[in-house]
Image (cartoon, rainbow, N blue to C red):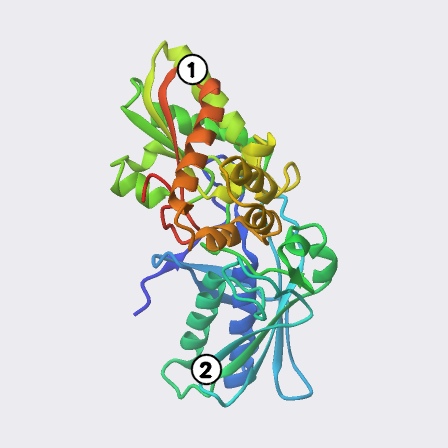
Amino acid sequence: MNTRRAFDLDVPAPNGLMRGRTTGSCATAAVKAALLRLLDGVTVDAVEVSLPDPDFYLPVPVAGVQTLSDGGVRAEVVKYAGDDPDTTRGATIFAEVRPNGTGTLRYLAAQGVGTVTAPGLRIPPGEAAINPVPRQMMRWAVEEVLAGRLDPGFDLAIGCVDGEKIAKRTFNPLLGIVGGISILGTSGIVEPMSLAAWIASIEVYIRVALGDAPPPAIALTPGKIGRGFAADTLQLQKHQVVQIANFIGDSLDQTETILREKQARLGALWMLGHPGKLAKLLDGSWDTHSSKSRMAMRGVAQFAAAQGFEPDIVLQIEKANTVENVIQILQPDARAHAFWCALEAHLAAMMQPRVPSVDRLSVRLFSMDGTPLGEAA
């Protein structure tokens, strides 16, 4: 019996803004609608998509379903982004589903969805740019429609109308993703974080974290990476970990302002995250949104040169596809751990002057899968 309940997008996020559906949720809904036509002959105008949070499913409207000349089925979903100024807002995401007789799922890039061509991403070169969580959501959708029936295997070709044009406004060309957008999302829900209004809401979250009398420590995180460390190692309560999106400088300034208002000091402030975000500070980017900052590889390469790494390694870092790729490049090097520790200390020294009411600011860096890179290791 399915005990999930509907995730209501009509309920605003804590910052008062409206949430939306990720491209991953849209693609999964299209897969499910296409499969219902393909296997059951049913045409639907909405489906329920199971989210990574086991308590919820997401209702998703379906814009259209059609049977193709080769017997496959195409379904389309229009991306709703809520109040977030997402580049894929209003885009038509589609899935073309065909049985393949292999007993396995194959994730393919249709027109407008990119293909990975370089290492360093969560998907290997040659694969469609469909991230792991959307792939898992699509697998759940297939299992739900099959409902115990024999699985012949399916090709799931995911596309986006005008995706090649949309991708030019993203980092995909720099990441080596060619041909279109990426299908993204870690929760299935777009949180409206990249708006000016979010900056104001961060102040509220920091005030809650600090409380009437500041606790021994709080943590700031650009995303969800590092939350496990905050809970398990630092023993911080959930409300003491503030997700700050791209607004590193503003968040530090707000922390200092609040502490001065309270005439209080904070013993420890932790900044937890991936170096792909936090190392943008090396270029002086305190707002790390892609529209306001460059990718971090050049700054990391210059730091590696200052740490004594050989010119060929420095060049590899500078030419890397992503900072996650830099992590892979340095992993076999015996100096890697010391390098990440030094980068953490350097970034902390850059941030500390913005929060003089904090006794100690510490940075901890993690790879995309949450593996500690520096002192936390």
Q: Amino acid at mark 1?
A: Pro
Residue 231 percent across, percent down from the top left: 28, 41
Residue at 56 percent across and 51 percent down: it is 322
Secondary structure type for disc 1? loop
Residue at 47 percent across and 31 percent down: it is 347
Whether residue 115 is visible, yes or no, is yes
Q: Quadrant of residue 75?
A: bottom right
Q: Which residue is mark 2?
A: 104
Q: Image check: 204 left or right of 182?
A: left
Q: Is residue 83 above or below residue 211?
A: below
Would you say the residues marked 2 and 1 are in contact, meaning their CB atoms lie under 8 Å apart? Answer: no
Residue 331 percent across, percent down from the top left: 43, 53
For the residue pair 145 and 374, the one nearer the viewer reads as 374
Whether residue 40 is visible, yes or no, is no
Q: Image check: 374 left or right of 60?
A: left
User: Which part of the image, by quadrant, shows the N terminus?
Assistant: bottom left
* Gap between marks 2 and 1 measured at Cα: 57 Å
* Residue 249: mark in rendering: none
Q: Which residue is mark 1?
A: 356
Q: Amino acid at mark 2?
A: Thr
Mark positioned earlier in the residue sequence (2 or 1) = 2
Q: Which residue is the extreme one toward the top? A: 263
Q: Callout 2: 10 Å neighbours few (<14), some, many (20+)?
A: some
Residue 262 percent across, percent down from the top left: 37, 12
User: Which part of the image, by quadrant, shows the C terminus?
Assistant: top left
Q: Is residue 189 above or below residue 136?
A: above
